[in-house]
Amino acid sequence: MAIREEIYYEGGPHIGDLIVNILLGFTVICIPLTVGAIVRALWLRYRITNRRITVIGGWMGRDRTDIVYSEISKITSVPRGLGLWGDMVVTLKNGSRLEMRALPKFRDLYAYIEDKLSSRAKQASGTIGTR
């Protein structure tokens, strides 16, 4: 019997990230940040389930990364946008990292992901926003 995969979160980056970067785009210096936020808003999607983390992104949404929780050695989260959204870095046991930018409800997502980790990974991750 196969275990059913239940979706906890599915969606794109927080809309506030796009709004702030569009406003910053009125200064010539911040135009690259604005372009990055527009690309993220158009093609970046996150799916966090009880079995894995999936990030679909890249140009036209053609890149897909799947991570199962047993591969994670550490997670770190940083609040952005006055704490309305945040960035999360997932470090894998092989040393590679996956950045998830402008996650809405990042504190809830952090707690959900941390709950799925091994005790060693939980200890390495520490408290939200401290590393």
Image (spheres, helix red, strand yellow):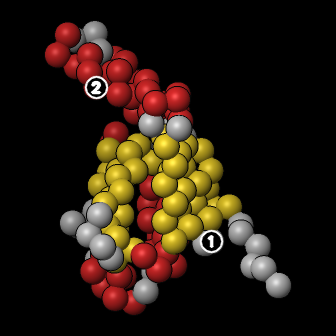
Image coords of residue 47 (percent x, y)? 59, 54
Residue 128 visible in the snapshot: no
Q: Give neighbour class at mark 1: few <14, some 14-19, many 20+ (Cα, 10 Å).
A: some
Judging depth in this view, the residue of 97 and 125 nearest the camera is 97
Q: Give neighbour class at mark 2: few <14, some 14-19, many 20+ (Cα, 10 Å).
A: some
Q: Which residue is painted at 26% across and 21% down in the image?
A: 32
Q: Secondary structure at mark 2?
A: helix
Q: Work out how far the residue at label 2 is from the one at label 1, CA to CA, in angstroms.
A: 33 Å
Quarter the C terminus occupies: bottom left
* Left or right: where 61 falls relative to 81: right
Using the image, determine if residue 69 lies above or below residue 119: above
* Left or right: where 9 falls relative to 113: right
Q: Secondary structure at mark 1?
A: loop
Q: Which residue is mark 1?
A: 50
Q: Which residue is painted at 54% across and 56% down in the image?
A: 54
Q: What residue type is disc 2 on?
A: Leu
Using the image, determine if residue 24 lies above or below residue 8: above
